[in-house]
Image (tube, helix red, strand yellow):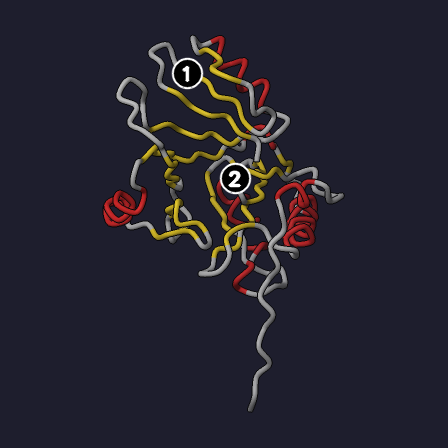
Amino acid sequence: MTTTPQTPPKKIRPSSFREESGLDDWRVLGEGACAYYRTGTFAEGAAFVSALATLPGSPERAPDVDLRPDGVTVRLITATDELYGLTEGDPELARRISALAAELGLTADPSALTGAQVTIDALDIPAVTPFWSALLGYAHRAGSPEDLIDPHRRNAPFYFQQMDAPRPQRNRLHIDVWVPHDEAEPRIAAALAAGGRLVTAEHAPSHWVLADPEGNEACVGTL
């Protein structure tokens, strides 16, 4: 018996996902789309996760799910040897998940979503990434040798940023914090009120650079 080769999924840009209708529950963090649903009990969340398993679709497009006593986070992202990110079927899958949550009486809370990435500045990226890959048990991200990701998609990715010259007087490791696009300004305001300072808004609304009282930097991004 012959089998017909499956057409690989087509990647879409995060902005394309955001422009789709019927996705009010969802926010793009990094290169995946996320929704957080509050639940009254752990059992209620487990029932939602069990219902998610009945949605039609291939195993390759099953969502990443994080179940906690007070809520469930669902993330849509495709990670293969050739592709990492959102694909053309994700908007429809997101709508189905939202409909299922509504049937169960669950409410989405986009303000509870946050993603993080560790960024390391390096002069010789190919020389340093093997160390971090071995230490963390991470693998290179498809199409991006500057990125290392957890193969199980549980922990924060590591991104290696090219430096042209040493910077001994400035930190070379910082945290990228991804927040929903409509939560960026409140989050930045809270960080500034807590003693931080704005380094630059040159790239806003893509991202802002902040620093703590001792100059340690962090980027707040919306894509």
Q: Name which residue type carries label 1.
A: Ala
Q: Which mark is residue 194?
A: none
Which quadrant holds residue 174? Answer: top left
Q: Which mark is residue 211?
A: 1
10 Å crowding of disc 1: few (<14), some (14-19), many (20+)? some
Nearer to us in this view, 122 or 35: 122
Nearer to us in this view, 140 or 185: 140
Q: Earlier in the sequence, mark 2 or mark 1?
A: 2
Q: Name which residue type carries label 2.
A: Gly
Q: Which residue sits at x=54%, y=20%?
A: 187
Residue tagged by mark 2? Answer: 30
Q: Which residue sits at x=48%, y=41%?
A: 42
Q: Residue 119: x, y in percent?
A: 38, 34
Where 2 sits versus 151, above or below? below
Q: Residue 84: x, y in percent?
A: 50, 52
Question: How far is the residue under mark 2 from the one under mark 1?
Answer: 21 Å
Asked if residue 218 lies left or right of residue 129, the reply is right
Asked if residue 186 lies left or right of residue 212, the reply is right
Circle 2: element type: loop
Q: Which residue sits at x=57%, y=49%?
A: 48
Which residue is the extreme one toward the bottom? 1
